[in-house]
Image (tube, rainbow, N blue to C red):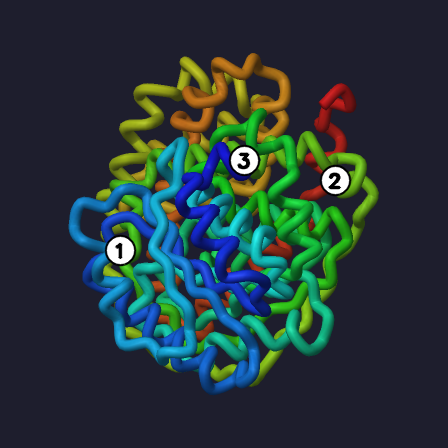
Amino acid sequence: MTTEILDQNVLRDIRKLGPVDVVVGIPSYGNASTIAGVAEALGFGMDKYYQGAKVLMINSDGGSKDGTPEAFLSADVPDRICRMAILYKGTSGKGSALRAIFEVARETEARICIVADADSRSITPDWARQLGYPVFQENYGYVTPFYLRDKHDATITNSLVYPVTRALYGQRIRQPIGGDFALSRGLVCILRQDRFWESHPSIAKFGVDIWMTTTAICEGLRICQAALGVKIHDPKKPSRDLSPMFRQVVGTMFELMKRYDHKWLIIKHSQPVDIYGEYRFSEIEDIEIHPLVLLNKLKEGYQIYGDNIWKQVLSPENYEEVSQVCQKDYKKFIFPMDLWARVVFDFAVYYCWVPKEDHDSLLESMIPLYQGRTASFAKEMAILSDELADAFVDGCASVFERLKPYLLERWPRRC
């Protein structure tokens, strides 16, 4: 497998280093303006909190044209932190970048692997401790981030991935696809050997984060969340940019529902997940969102997909409710949370039945519905603080839990 993702010259250089204690991986593509700050924060954090440990920091790049690897190598990092910039082989995408990092961790026999997004503008040296210590000192197998984010950031997480993961697998992991993680050697071995790489190419791209988190849950790893404070990065706007990411993340999530239905079918309630470190809410820079634009996307989607796809996917009652929602003007518009949960479950069930070649078009047709729910959330949260909005997201996730029997009644056992 190593020969598929790592160049032989890279392998030779890595093997010359010998075993290390910690691999720090930064996947990147076109992040020249931010990656040096990420490398410096993690470098000084590793130097401060992992004294005596041998650390290798890797930039796994997808062929950036803006000088990202050069920016990484020019960062002001303590001399004892070994650094390498590598160009992975194969499909370009975040998942492939992480796969290369996992191979480096295996080759170096690292005890832990820490991964951080290259576009973070709020990362501090303390993140190295918060992410790594639960694995390094307390035998956790997987650490996910616990951020403070603007209420309009991470809309796919808030409206879909968090509530579905919580309802299905019974763990309240607030940021299942946050982008900053820590993994034990055992989990790295599980992930790098998984045949999902070959059968589901979406995990070579943005589907990788939800696959990692779901695999960690279902394979029985001890999981905690690291309190990291504010998350400021380069967000994608739900009115554009998100189509490939949406299809890759949600498609992977639906595939994992099929793979692990023997796990989630018997789970009835969710439980809190430990948070490592202290956190407190603070208001952060606002992310601009345009609910009227999103509502128009929903209306356009109804014209394109309503009779064509939605009518087939949704139950008659849900289709009628969605039709009524799409007829409302902005002043009266609301996309109820219980309807949204049933819509998501309807799509998950239908995804399980349709041929693989129809998956992309099915997921594409779901995007206007997600945009409509996002518009509704923006209206509902207009006067609320980020802290109250976060509590509201938790309440929305509980609706998915409450409606899980709706999914159980419809889930085809052949999946």
Dot 1 amino acid type:
Pro
Q: Could you tell me which secondary element the residue under label 2 belongs to?
A: helix
- Decide which of 307, 272 is in the foreground and name it: 272
Q: Could you tell me which secondary element the residue under label 1 belongs to?
A: helix
* Comparing labels 1 and 3, the label whose residue is closer to the camera: 1
Callout 1 crowding tier (Cα within 10 Å): few <14, some 14–19, many ≥20: many
Distance (Cα) linking label 2 and label 1: 49 Å
Query: Which residue is depicted at the point 59% across and 55% down?
Result: 397
Callout 2 crowding tier (Cα within 10 Å): few <14, some 14–19, many ≥20: few
Q: Could you tell me which secondary element the residue under label 3 belongs to?
A: helix
* Comparing labels 2 and 1, the label whose residue is closer to the camera: 1
Q: Which numbered disc covers residue 252? A: 3
Dot 3 amino acid type:
Thr
Quarter occupied by residue 354? top right
Q: Is residue 14 above or below residue 385?
A: above
x, y percent for residue 113: 56, 61
Query: Which residue is depicted at the point 70% across and 36% down?
Result: 406
Residue assigned mark 2? 405
Distance (Cα) linking label 3 and label 2: 22 Å
